[in-house]
Image: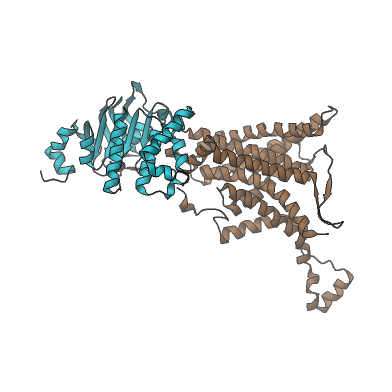
Chain colours: A cyan, B brown
Amino acid sequence: MLVLSRLELAYGGIQAVKGIDIVVDQGELVCLVGANGAGKTTTLKGICGLLPVKAGTIVYRGENVTGSPAFRLVRQGLALVPEGRGVFGGLTIEENLAMGAYIRTDRAGVAADVERVYALFPRLKERRRQTAGTLSGGEQQMLAMGRAIMSRPKLLLLDEPSMGLAPLMVQKVFETIIAVAREGVTILLVEQNARLALEVSHRGYVMESGEITLAGEARALLHDPKVRAAYLGEAA
Amino acid sequence: MDTFLQQIINGLTLGSVYAIVALGYTMVYGIIQLINFAHGEVVMIGAMVAYSTIVALSGGTGLPPALVLASGVAAAIPVCMAVGYALERVAYRPLRHAPRLAPLITAIGLSIILQHLALIVWSRNPLPYPQIIATVTYQITATAGGATITNVQIAIIGGSLATMALLLFLVYRTKLGIAMRAVAQNQQVAGLMGIDINRVISLTFVIGAGLAAIAGVMVGSYYGIAHYQMGFILGLKAFSAAVLGGIGNLGGAMLGGLLLGIIEALGAGYVGDLTNLCNLSGWSTALAQRCAVDSNLTLFGSNYQDVFAFLVLIAVLVFRPSGLLGERVSDRA
Ligand SMILES: Nc1ncnc2c1ncn2[C@@H]1O[C@H](COP(=O)(O)OP(=O)(O)OP(=O)(O)O)[C@@H](O)[C@H]1O
Ligand SMILES: [Mg+2]
């Protein structure tokens, strides 16, 4: 589904991602964990075409898409829920969802999917004519995920969906991730909450200052002493 | 004569033209924070193209006048849209990430270029708009000699209101309109929705230029004249109107345009009386004697009309930079 080879990304002269290899197979839920500033967000931006690729390649569904702009990749079934949610604060919830379905022309299907999102997040339905800027952080996260679902993605990239949320909300968000994955959507999940992320994922990658330092089965990583020490807050 | 009512009517007419020109400024500003100072020239091109079309068609073709006028509008709109598209594509897009001063200076350069192109094509002379539809004046006050309104004024006010309603529908009820607002708020995230940002920005210029074309025909018909420099002051006034309403805000541009038109008309109607030195006769016997001979000693006449737009602009910038309906800049997502 997605193959990153020797991918390098930089901000001006600052190298943020230093030649990483990541593979996500069809139907997998893969997580990418790491400390602040490790380069996780940068990696996702690179995949989506929001940052120019310095070196290396991105192959998506068998096609080399290195350097493709974001709006083209979305049309090929790739969706990103950005860090900090990125909802359109001045647009209503309905309008935000409509933008999620911007690339679609099947009106009936879109209408059905709006109802599906509302069923998943009833709070959004209650407030559908309210501007998204008036929603709480958790509600905005729901909206951002709902909006991504609206594009019927084949590969969904999530950047710290649990950031800044209360425990109950975090649980809701992860339940949604699992539900979406069950429907056959391939997911690459970036999280600081390494324990939760590894618990729900099939496989995981650990990133440290721009490099992948560990990779493997999520369960194995959960029991890896280095991971436990560095990311799960336990003594080695 | 009922000066007040009359000036309100004149002001509404002028103001509705300002409003649709101001919408062009405000839409472009809203989406890419650029002040397209060449927008006034697009209005002028619209007036010129319609002029040529009307002149060509009214010379013995036997077409009904309304159709001739409609053809003028129909010709002006696509030409202006093409100009608007070209401005963005050729001049502004390459500068989108440049420091703000660069596109601003470019805009001024473009407006000079457009003026001179028009000078080459249409000459430096004021062109008399053919009076193809006879002006009809309607009395609207009970007493004779009161306020009047003409069919041209009615058409301008009605036409602008219809145009504005159409625009609001486009922006608030269609997918393209939602996409325009999404791009205005966050280009990067809009791209993540699959929105082709460049296309949406192009369309914004094109729509604004279409509005400018309509305004150009209105101004030409109202004043009965088109001139290659007519876009300059008109553009500055419409820009002032957009700032008055709150730049970037559609409702603000409409309100600002109408208000500015009214302020200007009232100003023109009363400035003579207000600045008449004879008002001060009580203070000086010399003045009283002078005024007994001729009671008209005005300092500023109605030809100072243009000043009001800029007084308003300055006042807004000093006292309420965000404009009447504008949000504070920091509120923008
Ligand atoms: N716009 C930018 N310009 C310059 N440097 C940047 C920019 N964005 C990020 N960086 C740098 O790139 C590195 C990786 O940042 P990135 O945002 O990818 O980290 P992250 O793993 O997502 O961290 P976090 O968990 O805090 O979100 C950091 O050192 C950061 O300072
Ligand atoms: Mg991050």
Identify which residue, B210 or B168, lies in the foreground: B168
Of the four image quadrants, the one with ligand 1 is: top left
Residue A158 horizontal/vertical position (percent): 32, 37
The quadrant of the picture occupied by the C terminus of chain A is top left
Image point (76%, 56%), residue name: B7
The answer to whether one can see residue B69 in this image is yes
Residue B86 horizontal/vertical position (percent): 59, 33
The quadrant of the picture occupied by the N terminus of chain A is top left
Q: Dividing the picture into quarters, in which one does residue A51 lie?
A: top left
Up-down: is A34 above or below A76? below
Image point (67%, 48%), residue name: B18
Up-down: is B292 above or below B187? below
Please identify the residue farthest to the top as the structure is shown.
A62
Image point (26%, 44%), residue name: A36
Identify which residue, B129 or A235, lies in the foreground: A235
Image point (65%, 39%), residue name: B211
The answer to whether one can see residue A104 in this image is no
Q: How many marks?
A: 0
Residue B247 horizontal/vertical position (percent): 56, 50
User: Relative to residue B151, is residue B201 drawn left or right?
Assistant: left
User: Relative to residue B133, is residue A122 drawn left or right?
Assistant: left
User: Relative to residue A225, is residue A187 drawn left or right?
Assistant: right
Residue A25 horizontal/vertical position (percent): 27, 25
Please identify the residue farthest to the left as the structure is shown.
A236
Q: Dividing the picture into quarters, in which one does residue A32 lie?
A: top left
